[in-house]
Amino acid sequence: MSFTSNIKNEISNLDYPKSEIIAELSAIVNINAQITNDKIIVTTENYGLSRRIYKLIKDLYGIDIIVTKEKVNRLKRSHIINIEIEERVEDILKDLNVVNEEGKRLHKPESYLCEIDEEKKAYLRGAFLICGSVNDPKTSRYHLEFIIDNKTAANYVNSLLNELGFNSKVLKREKTYMVYLKESEKISDFIKLLNAYNSLFYYEDIRIYRDHKNMTNRLNNCEQANIDKIVFSSNEQLENIRKLKEKYDFELLDDKIKEICIYKEKYKESSMEELAQIMSIETNKKITKSGVNHRFRKIKEMVRE
């Protein structure tokens, strides 16, 4: 079972006040339903969601609902579940603010439907249940999306997300619109908004592990880069010492230059800091990394000249 299915199954059994249930059902019907004068049909492939839609509508309106299962051959789908409403269709559509009093289709509900944050969250919960998905953090990049056919409906979902601080965006596809989140922390906050706490703990465990792994890799890369830099610098210093000896009579060189050459050739793999420590101990004279670096710069200038 996918991570998205786990989230949807987890939140399909939660109870909410009537105003929030209305907002949730409004999103489901508005985004997904096929609507005619005498029928509303909502389709889903998730059994938990089909049971939730059936129960919520049954409890609210006390009507008979027809549920059918249909086999399909589309992408990863093997079946879809059709929830058909044939009673009180006009009342339900007006109550859910999917149509106005004149019967005109509304792809964006009136402001009263989602006046408070909890109702906005409920609408987003319905939108996620019917058209949302989120990548499993263990197997791929961080990504949460809603696939919506209607532009107005997509922009409304996007506006609710941004009102709640999710920094979402809308992308036009060929025939649909994708509202999406990319930031891992925002996706985590959205799963929390859904009250899917088991899924949230799983997501956070994986996210912490991946962040820790990435940090370890970055540190290892920095350490390796530092080692590579030391090796490159050390090879360059040894090469300059070799060239210096070819061009000059070594015995006639300045004592400090001769000293650094002798110690570098003796301790070939040492960094400048390590070389400074070794020379300070063996000569009983305090020599700093800066002093060692100054001598190597002098050698480099002599070779260049």
Image (cartoon, rainbow, N blue to C red):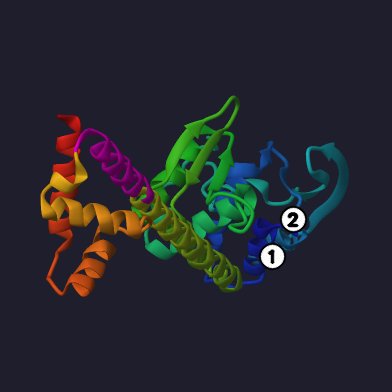
Q: What secondary structure predominates along the stretch shown in magenta?
A: helix
Residue located beneath label 1 in the image: 9
User: Which SS class for mark 2?
Assistant: loop
Residue 57 appears in which quarter of the rendering? Answer: bottom right
Quarter of the image with the N terminus is: bottom right
Q: Mark 1 is on which residue type?
A: Asn
Q: CA distance from mark 2 to mark 1?
A: 8 Å
Which residue is pictured at 51% across the width and 62% down the height?
Answer: 213
Residue 302 is covered by the magenta coloring: no
Q: For the C terminus, give its image quadrant.
A: top left
Question: Amino acid type of disc 2?
Answer: Asn
Indicate which disc residue 46 carries: 2
Q: Residues within 10 Å of mark 1 (few under 14, many from 20)?
A: some
Residue 118 at x, y percent in the picture: 43, 65
Residue range highlighted in magenta: 231-248
Task: Please determine whether, in this image, residue 217 is positioned above or below residue 169.
Answer: below
Q: Earlier in the sequence, mark 2 or mark 1?
A: 1
Secondary structure beneath label 1? helix
Q: Considering depth in this image, is 269 or 192 the residue closer to the camera?
A: 269
Q: Are marks 2 and 1 in contact (CB under 8 Å)?
A: yes
